[in-house]
Image (tube, rainbow, N blue to C red):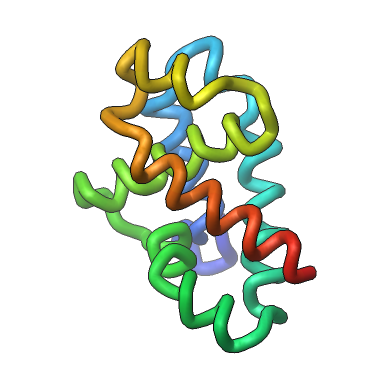
Amino acid sequence: MSSKGEKNWREHFKEILIKNVKQPYDAYIDEFINFLDKLIRTWDMSDEDIKGRYAYHVTLLQALSNRTNVVRAKLNAYYAYLVYRKYASAYKLMKSKVVAGGESLYTWLRMYRDVMKSS
């Protein structure tokens, strides 16, 4: 918790993941939160094209909201990270109905690749 007793976005995101991600996919939650720190720092130092293209994504990642669409986006961002790191395949995640479809996964994957290669 922050000094004022308020949650920061990292704590909030981690709580959402702990509550919603089932085994065996829950093994990389801390690693993912650390990745997000680096991703957001890299995005913040990126050129204006990258910043503009992914500003909404970064806003979703840092949102302190429990709205269904925000939680779903955060979960999809996490599962896309598993694919990005080759811990899981998109096909397996979709087949087992962990994610509803591939579009969101591939949107997050594109962001991770674009931002991280801009560093």
Q: Quadrant of the N terminus?
A: bottom right
The x, y position of residue 53, in whole percent, is 47, 75
Residue 27 found in image quarter: top right
Q: Is residue 62 above or below residue 106?
A: below
Please identify the residue farthest to the left as the structure is shown: 68
Q: Is residue 34 left or right of residue 91?
A: right
Instruction: Give the quarter of the figure containing the C terminus.
Output: bottom right
Q: Give residue 37's position: percent from left, percent from top.
A: 67, 58
Q: Residue at x 63, y 62 (%)?
A: 114
Above-or-below relation of 89 to 38:
above
Question: How many numbered marks does the figure carry?
Answer: 0
In the image, residue 104 lies at what x, y percent? Answer: 36, 45
**Residue 41 spot, x, y in % from top left:** 70, 70
| Corner quadrant of residue 39 | bottom right
The front one of 53 and 59 is 53
> Image point 68% across, 79% down: which residue?
46
On the picture, is 26 further left or further right than 41?
Answer: left
